[in-house]
């Protein structure tokens, strides 16, 4: 049995026991893939009752899926890598809020991100001393796309009020402009941080060239992030 199938066999029964919605409705809202399906929508009480951290995630213009934390992988020098899993075995891995790997999404998938310097997201964008520039390498598939050099520039864009898991937050918005000069590609990522706690509440990221943007709402945070 693969890791994903094993994780699902453990996660789904607990989820079905913990939520008040019927199992027949859950099948329509777990996945991010199927156009025309309704957005996943759960109450704050249902989400908080789950024993797992959870997110909403949307791929491009597709339906909003509900993913739970399947595994937290420790890292020696940065925050743990969190692997979020849907019932259709779609996986989004995040490290300090950055998408660092995707699996089984349609089209392009991000294989890995590499850098010799700390990600400003891991250092804390709300800290005045955090660098606002970063260089990293991207690996993505299909095809042999290895080590594409990317340069990113962060800029704070003021404050916004957003609602996550039925709670309203005053958030600082940061814009990240990512440029891959060798293939003449550029895109913009967005990050919303709670002004009081500094916790990342929401993000919209294009993980790799030719990928649709992925929007994530962090619903119930991983305990290690609190």
Image (tube, rainbow, N blue to C red):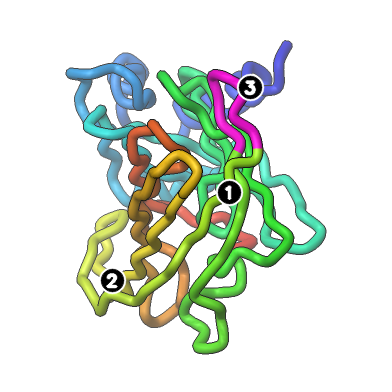
Mark 1 touching mark 3, by CB under 8 A?
no
Looking at this view, is 203 or 22 the one in front? 203
Residue at 38% x, 60% y: name it. Answer: 177
Work out how far the residue at label 3 is from the one at label 2, CA to CA, in angstroms. Answer: 33 Å
Please check the rendered image and state whether residue 208 is part of the magenta-colored stretch, yes or no: no
Asked if one can make out residue 117 in the rendered structure from this viewpoint, the answer is yes
Residue at 43% x, 37% y: name it. Answer: 209
Location of residue 159 by image quarter: bottom left
Location of residue 31 by image quarter: top left
Asked if 198 appears above or below 224 in the picture, the reply is below
Work out how far the residue at label 2 is from the one at label 1, CA to CA, in angstroms. Answer: 35 Å
Q: Which mark is residue 169?
A: 2
Of the two numbered discs 1 and 3 on the same chain, state the one appearing first in sequence: 3
Q: Which mark is residue 186?
A: none
Residue at 47% x, 18% y: name it. Answer: 88
How far from the left and from the top, in percent, is residue 48? 43, 51
Which range is magenta? 139-146
Residue 61 is left or right of residue 44, and the answer is left
Which SS class for mark 3?
helix
Residue at 58% x, 42% y: name it. Answer: 148
Of the two numbered discs 3 and 2 on the same chain, state the one appearing first in sequence: 3
Residue 212 is left or right of residue 12, and the answer is left
* Residue that sits furthest to the top in the current view: 1
* Residue that sits furthest to the bottom in the current view: 128
Give the residue at mark 1.
Answer: 149
Of the two numbered discs 2 and 1 on the same chain, state the one appearing first in sequence: 1
Which SS class for mark 1?
strand
Please check the rendered image and state whether residue 144 is part of the magenta-colored stretch, yes or no: yes
Q: Which mark is residue 4?
A: 3
How far from the left and from the top, in percent, is residue 99? 51, 46
Looking at this view, is 89 or 114 the one in front? 114
């Amino acid at each position: 049995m693969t890791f994903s199938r094993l994780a699902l066999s453990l996660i789904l029964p607990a989820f079905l026991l913990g939520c008040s919605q019927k199992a027949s409705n859950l099948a329509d809202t777990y996945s991010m893939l199927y156009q025309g399906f309704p957005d996943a929508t759960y109450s704050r009480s249902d989400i908080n009752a789950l024993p797992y951290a959870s997110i909403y995630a949307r791929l491009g213009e597709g339906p909003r899926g509900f993913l739970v934390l399947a595994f937290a992988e420790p890292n020696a020098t940065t925050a743990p890598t969190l692997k979020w899993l849907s019932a259709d075995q779609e996986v989004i891995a995040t490290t300090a809020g950055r998408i660092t790997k995707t699996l089984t999404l349609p089209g392009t998938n991000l294989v890995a991100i590499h850098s010799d310097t700390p990600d400003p997201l891991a250092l804390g964008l709300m800290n005045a001393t955090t660098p606002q520039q970063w260089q990293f390498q991207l690996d993505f598939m299909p095809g042999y796309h290895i080590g594409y050099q990317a340069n990113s520039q962060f800029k704070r864009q003021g404050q916004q009020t957003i609602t996550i898991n039925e709670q309203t937050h005053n958030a600082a918005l940061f814009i990240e402009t990512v440029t891959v000069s060798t293939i003449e590609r550029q895109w913009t990522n967005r990050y919303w941080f709670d002004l009081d706690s500094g916790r990342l509440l929401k993000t919209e990221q294009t993980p790799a060239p030719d990928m649709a943007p992925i929007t994530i709402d962090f619903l119930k945070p991983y305990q290690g992030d609190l």
